[in-house]
Image: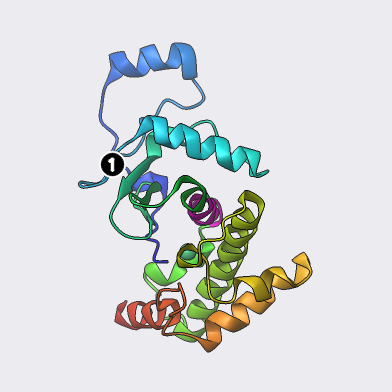
């Protein structure tokens, strides 16, 4: 899926010395407020807590500062500037948790989103391949979480999911990368990742 990336340093910091001082009493290591949520993306703290619990049950490492950065909106999910994670608002919990695992991979790794950054003369083919490589890793994580949680709804699985999960774990990401490169126009549960990354890269200065 698409994911937009900017570093947390792009978040506007407001001067609130008193609040900052109060925060420092109980959370000195993390005084910055979370990024504002995008419009039309609703925070749902109870649902978010349920999803994070499902991810933990599926063996995923979940940070304790994620809650304020997760919201729900139309679409299949994305990462907004400020590393805010938008999740699909109309999916069941378990597939949504698996999608969250995918997007968390992007937040943590970041490198898959280089095609969104100014390419500064770098070769688009190399950048697209790097982006697809990171997407392939994120997709495998998503598939593995779905399998762990027992998600069988074909509308929430990728068309090649059984094939990928049938491989030894160490071979899955490479096979998924080959699939993404062979299917730049998406389909079967995939967005047109290769096409979109390439188009966006070529449009960058
Ligand atoms: Zn992705």
Magenta span has 156? no
Indicate the quadrant where residue 175 lies.
bottom right
Q: Is residue 165 above or below residue 104?
A: below
Residue marked by disc 1 = 37
Q: Is residue 58 above or below residue 15?
A: below
Residue 96 x %, y %: 46, 50
Residue furthest toward the front? 153
Could you classify mark 1 by the number of other residues whose Cα lies within 10 Å: few (under 14), some (14-19), or many (20 or more)?
many
Q: Residue at x 34, y 42 (%)?
A: 71
Quadrant placement of the N terminus: bottom left
Q: What secondary structure is the stretch in magenta mostly built from?
A: helix
Q: Is residue 140 above or below residue 70?
A: below
Residue 68 x %, y %: 38, 33
Residue 187 x %, y %: 43, 80
- The residue closer to the viewer here, 145 or 69, is 145
Indicate the quadrant where residue 58 lies.
top right
Residue 173 visible from this viewpoint:
no
Residue 92 x %, y %: 43, 49
Magenta span has 106? yes
- The residue closer to the viewer here, 6 or 92, is 92
- The residue closer to the viewer here, 54 or 130, is 54
Q: Residue at x 56, y 62 (%)?
A: 138
Q: Tell me where the magenta segment starts and ends, as one range.
A: 98-109
Left or right of 184 on screen, residue 174: right
Q: Residue at x 32, y 77 (%)?
A: 204
Residue 171 visible from this viewpoint:
yes
Residue furthest toward the bottom? 182
SS state under label 1: loop
Q: Is residue 166 above or below residue 17?
A: below
Indicate the quadrant where residue 190 lies.
bottom left
Left or right of 113 on screen, residue 35: left
């Amino acid at each position: 899926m698409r994911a937009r990336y900017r570093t947390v340093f792009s978040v506007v910091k407001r001067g609130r010395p008193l609040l900052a001082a109060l925060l420092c009493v109980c959370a000195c290591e993390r005084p910055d407020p979370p990024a504002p949520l995008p419009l039309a993306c609703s925070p749902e703290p109870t649902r978010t807590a349920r999803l994070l619990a499902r991810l933990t049950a599926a063996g995923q490492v979940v940070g304790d500062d994620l809650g304020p950065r997760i919201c729900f909106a139309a679409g299949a999910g994305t990462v907004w500037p400020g590393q805010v994670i938008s999740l699909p608002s109309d999916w069941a919990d378990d597939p949504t948790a698996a999608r969250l695992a995918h997007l968390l991979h992007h937040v943590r790794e970041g490198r898959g989103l280089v095609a969104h950054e100014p390419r500064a003369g770098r070769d688009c083919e190399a950048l697209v391949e790097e982006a697809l490589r990171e997407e392939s890793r994120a997709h495998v994580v998503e598939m593995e979480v779905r399998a762990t949680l027992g998600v069988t709804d074909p509308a929430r699985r990728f068309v090649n999911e059984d094939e990928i999960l049938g491989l030894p774990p160490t071979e899955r990401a490479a096979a998924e990368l080959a699939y993404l490169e062979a299917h730049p126009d998406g389909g079967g549960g995939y967005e047109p990742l290769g096409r979109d990354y390439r188009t966006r890269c070529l449009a960058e200065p």
